[in-house]
Amino acid sequence: MKSLKAGNNILAAAHEQIAIIEHGESGDFALVPFQEKLEQSNIFPLKPTSINILQVNIGKMCNQVCKHCHVDAGPDRKEIMNRETMQQCIDVLKQNEQFTTIDITGGAPEMNPHFKWFVSELSKLGRHIIVRCNLTIILANKKYFDLPQFYKKHHVEVVSSLPFYTQDRTDRQRGNGVFENSIKALLMLNEAGYGIEGTGLVLNLVYNPAGAFLPTAQSVLEKEYKDALMKRHGIAFNNLFAITNLPISRFLDYLLNSGNYENYMEKLVNAYNPVAAENVMCRNTISVGWDGYLYDCDFNQMLELKVNCSNKHISNYNDSELINREIIIGQHCYGCTAGAGSSCGGAVA
């Protein structure tokens, strides 16, 4: 009971610290409400332009504990999507052909005991399937060794996070030994044909900054990654996605504990790009939580901000309600609209 009370006190202190900073009581900086920026860009209220991506988080369990993880995933997380909810997702896809892409995420989605069944069933629908694989899961246990061939069989696009092309920066962010195992997993994927020109098997990598700064231009980083990984390890891949860290969960903890919150938010506000705001991923995506509840995006999901509709669960999916809804926004949305913008597919502007 004592530890729970202490945890609540820490959380309350964090919220108080954020409020002081955002209202300008700690200095010259006051955080402009994100709604005000959208109003200036003539895109408030923010509404969907289409709904063609269903992003499904099938569990928060993961074999890694990454410092920047907005899901707060790890080996101790027990939230796992059951087969009934997966079937409800499949039923919605069958009834709504406008969904062209199914984006499966976690945690490490492969740790869900129904993962392979889910992907196999989805592949029968003839839609594009993305799996967000952390790479090290492939080597975590012999039951995962066949994942590259499984992905190949179902023509899955693999999207994998690799914080940097050097060991020190990667291991600092994701844990000791992660870089070495990631390289081994990438070589296994290459051997299966992933990332190799002419195979049609797509392997994309993801870069997240290791500190309180915005990512370098995506095209510049992609060239650096491709040159370094090929020269040093003989690894090929298709595209690099540069994703901005949003100030939620573990990254928010880091910002507050390191005294970087105010400076980081100021960077995001000053880098606000109306073109990026026009193209944010919540305008064509619906995010499904492990328990089947619906969200505008994966980040709102982690903040438990359910869609602004009467039907909030995949079992009661209502396309007309969702296409006409107002998207729920917050100050964290600055992360998706700074600079070239950020989405699960990288830069948007």
Image (tube, helix red, strand yellow):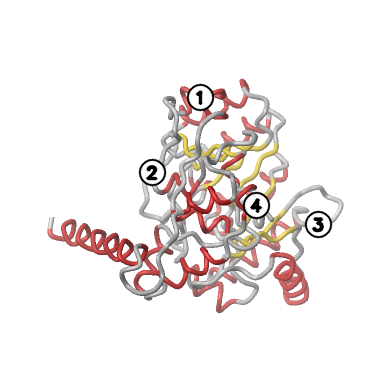
Residue that badge 3 annotates: 196
* Left/right of residue 17 with respect to residue 46 in the rendered view: left
- Front residue of this view, candidates 55 and 161: 55
Where is the C terminus found, in terms of image quarters?
Answer: bottom right
Check contact, mark 1 vs mark 4: CB within 8 A: no
Disc 1 is placed on an element classified as: loop
Q: Marks 1 and 3, how far apart in space?
A: 38 Å
What residue is disc 4 on? 345
Circles 4, 3 touching at the beta carbon (< 8 Å): no
The location of residue 277, given as percent across then percent down, is 60, 51
What amino acid is at disc 2?
Answer: Glu
Q: Are marks 2 and 3 in contact (CB under 8 Å)?
A: no
Mark linked to residue 304:
2
**Residue 216: percent from the left, percent from the top?**
65, 70
- Amino acid carrying label 1: it is Tyr
Between 209 and 284, the one lying in front of the other is 284
Foreground: disc 2 or disc 3: 2
Residue 201 lies, with reference to residue 28, above or below; the image says: above
Q: Gap between marks 1 and 2, in whole Å?
A: 18 Å
Percent x, y for residue 204?
69, 56
